[in-house]
Image: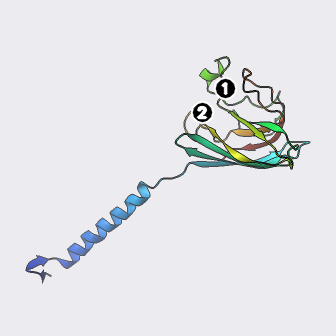
Amino acid sequence: MRHRFDGRAARTPGVLIALAACSVMLSGCGLIFQNHEKRADAVLQPTPGNAARGTVTLIERADGVQVSYSLTDMPPNSDHALTVHERGDCIAVNDQDSSPVFALPAERRKPGFRLEGELGNIHADATGAATGFIVATDVSLDGVRSVISRAIMLHREAMDPYANAPHNVGPALACGVIRR
């Protein structure tokens, strides 16, 4: 069936089908090119004999992974190391039994270098709470530097940024496994 518009013939069903197909294809482009945020979370539970707990959220950005933390029940006015460990194991949390701090094999052999899993120190306020973020430039949420399925631990002591790795930061106060 043909209809005339301004002297031109058009096939109504064919034009409508073509327009519908173009519309569907173009609307799908938004889904394909949509920016999906890479994100992971960990719930830190207290280790035996400790009360510290909280959440850690990791979001991959252009300049590294933003590690946001909200922790409570720590000793008031204290500093603590936040580290990512090789294995996602929160059962063995003392210095002798826990897995080593996450590092690529080549980095582990360089004396004096900071390991990828050494995220930094956090400070608990007068109420024993800490909220903030660290940008970790040496880790990611995929690939060889991925921290997914690894343990993240809040340690009793702070890291000395000028000491050679590995740092003696004491046992973990809290531990959680990083999950997507």
Q: Position of residue 42 (x, y in %)?
A: 71, 47
- Residue 89 seen by the camera: no
Q: Are marks 1 and 2 in contact (CB under 8 Å)?
A: yes
Residue of label 1: 114
Residue 138 tag number: 2
Q: Nearer the viewer, residue 51 or 130?
A: 130
Residue 73, placed above or below residue 25: above
Residue 122, placed above or below residue 3: above
Name the image quarter holding the N terminus. Answer: bottom left
Residue 31, placed above or below residue 18: above
> Which picture quadrant has residue 93?
top right
For numbered disc 2, what is the local secondary structure?
Answer: loop
Toward the left, the furthest residue is: 7
Q: Position of residue 168 (x, y in %)?
A: 80, 26
Q: CA distance from mark 1 to mark 2?
A: 10 Å
Could you tell me which residue is drawn at 88 percent across and 44 percent down? Answer: 76
